[in-house]
Image (tube, rainbow, N blue to C red):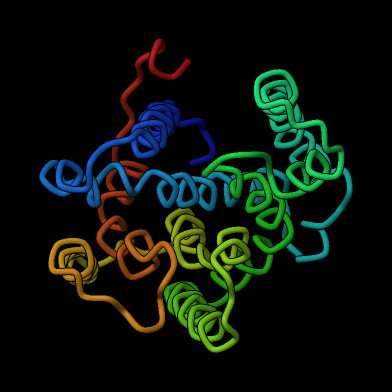
Amino acid sequence: MTKRNPFLDIVKAACILFVIITHDKISESFRLKTLFPFWINMAVPMFLIISGYVYAISFERNKISEIHEAYALNFIMPKFIRYTVPFILAYLVELADEIFIRHNYSVASWIFHFFNGGIGPGSYYYPVLLQFLFIYPVIYFVVRRYEFKGLLLCFAMNAVFEFFQKVWGCGGGFYRMLMFRYIFVIAFGSWLYQRKEKTSAIWKIFSFAVGVIFIILYCYLKVKPKIIIYWTATCFLACLYLLPIADFLITKTHISCKPAEL
């Protein structure tokens, strides 16, 4: 189980392309006709399911059996560096664009953008990954202790977060930076690795059906939820559609293709 699955790199490569595609100037009608909500839009949730899965492997490989061990500096620092170095390199490119193309010489704005994950629609991802480092151990041990009930508990936590962000009037700019909107999909990735028994097909069918219905209602029939008002098309309810697909891709598929992996 701890052996590297090369197909995960291929899935991540596809998701990278999906992220690029979804931020292109493509009309809403074309997106709906080509079913973007069911594949292109699921790139980031898929990334985070994989992250939950491979971090569970990392915890086992490093013999993390107590929650305090997950916060040891020698365990968490290499991961922090692995995320931060590529981010800084990308941000330097963005900063060059700000200075030489856009003629933005405001040091204050440079600093602001740095701590907000950079510039552009995907800039929330680096702050989300940093939060992931510190919140994932809680998710991991909840799932480890309570198994499927722990996964359901994380689902409930995700729902509670959505409720309170609405009650408190959380702005979209702040909401997008919070990892809590992804608690359930991360927990699902962790559960995929930690589950001890073969799961029934019933939950897969139910999960798939609920997710499909939600996506159709929101994206195609324009039914607007009163609570989940930000990134609704990829919220934890929409992602229910993705779960059985992710289960198959992550645990049942072991295809290798070196160019795609690279």
User: Residue pushed farthest bottom?
Assistant: 167
Q: Position of residue 181 (x, y in %)?
A: 52, 67
Q: Position of residue 256 (x, y in %)?
A: 35, 20
Q: Is residue 202 visible?
A: no
Left or right of 40? Residue 56 is right
Q: Is residue 105 above or below residue 248?
A: above
Of residues 78 and 34, the one nearer the viewer is 34
Left or right of 183? Residue 16 is left
Residue at the spot x=63%, y=39% of the render?
119
Left or right of 38? Residue 25 is right
Q: Is residue 180 visible?
A: yes
Q: Is residue 86 above or below residue 146?
A: above
Q: Position of residue 176 (x, y in %)?
A: 56, 60
Residue at the spot x=10%, y=45% of the render?
33
Based on the displayed image, in which of its 4 quarters is residue 243 positioned?
bottom left
Q: Position of residue 48 (x, y in %)?
A: 49, 50
User: Residue pushed farthest top?
Assistant: 259
Of residues 255 and 161, the one nearer the viewer is 161
Residue at the spot x=13%, y=68% of the render?
221
Of residues 90 and 27, the one nearer the viewer is 27
Of residues 158 and 191, the one nearer the viewer is 158
Residue at the spot x=25%, y=60% of the render?
241
Q: Is residue 132 above or below residue 19?
A: below
How many callouts does the rendering have? 0
